Image: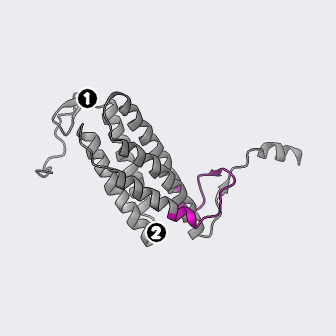
Amino acid sequence: MGHRLSRIATRTGDDGTTGLGDGRRVAKDCARVNALGEVDELNSVIGVLLAEPLPTEVAAWLAEVQHDLFDLGSELAVPGYAALTEAHVAGLDERLAAMNAALPMLKEFILPGGCRQAALAHQARSVCRRAERAVVALARDEAVGEASRQYLNRLSDALFVLARVLNRAEGRDDVLWRPHRRETLAGE
């Protein structure tokens, strides 16, 4: 950042446009700004999760994820700029494998829930999927780095597994989906 923002309310967006990092002004509801907003919301949801008591290594990892997401935001704000790389994706793959190794095999679908931290990780996962959809939609019309799309895809998987890890750390079971529960209740 070449200069500090001394004034947040500039009023330049009152006409429904916003400035990109390359100086262009675009509509606030264009695909690029939508994707940027979804990534920003994801970062905020992860910030809420970080406000909860978490294992130290989880908190450190999520703080790094927040920085990666801010980097992704800069990539989206400056068309043609690439911030995330294959190394970012590989790092998520490694984290995902390490977290998964300590968990029992999942044989059923699970519902978001369990302990508060796990529920927030599930919320972050669903917001991540929305951010991924927005970036994919943008990529249909404009250049978006492949690593950025892959990063969001892996991150949503990692947040799902993190929810399971957090439940286990709190001594809670995953909340299993019971698909035929009404039939079972009716038969009793």
Q: Is residue 87 left or right of residue 74?
A: right
Label 1: few (<14), some (14–19) or many (≥20) C-alpha neighbours in 10 Å: few
In what element is the residue under mark 1?
loop
Q: Is residue 65 above or below residue 35?
A: below
Q: Residue at x 88, y 49 (%)?
A: 188
Q: Residue at x 78, y 44 (%)?
A: 180
Q: Where does the magenta region start and end?
A: 98-119
In what element is the residue under mark 2?
loop
Type of colouring = one colour
Q: Is residue 149 above or below residue 25?
A: below
Give the amino acid type for the residue marked by disc 1 in the picture. Gly
Q: Is residue 131 left or right of residue 4?
A: right
Give the amino acid type for the residue marked by disc 2 in the picture. Pro
Residue 77 x/y as whole percent:
25, 40
Is-magenta flag for residue 112?
yes
> What is the C-alpha distance between the residues marked 1 and 2?
39 Å
Residue 126 x/y as whole percent:
50, 46
Judging by the rendered image, the residue that carries numbered circle 1 is 16
Number of numbered markers: 2
Badge 1 or badge 2: first in the primary sequence = 1
Seen as rendered, the residue at the extreme bottom is 56
- For the residue pair 186 and 92, the one nearer the viewer reads as 92
- For the residue pair 32 and 47, the one nearer the viewer reads as 32
Judging by the rendered image, the residue that carries numbered circle 2 is 53
Residue 61 x/y as whole percent:
40, 64
Residue 13 x/y as whole percent:
21, 33
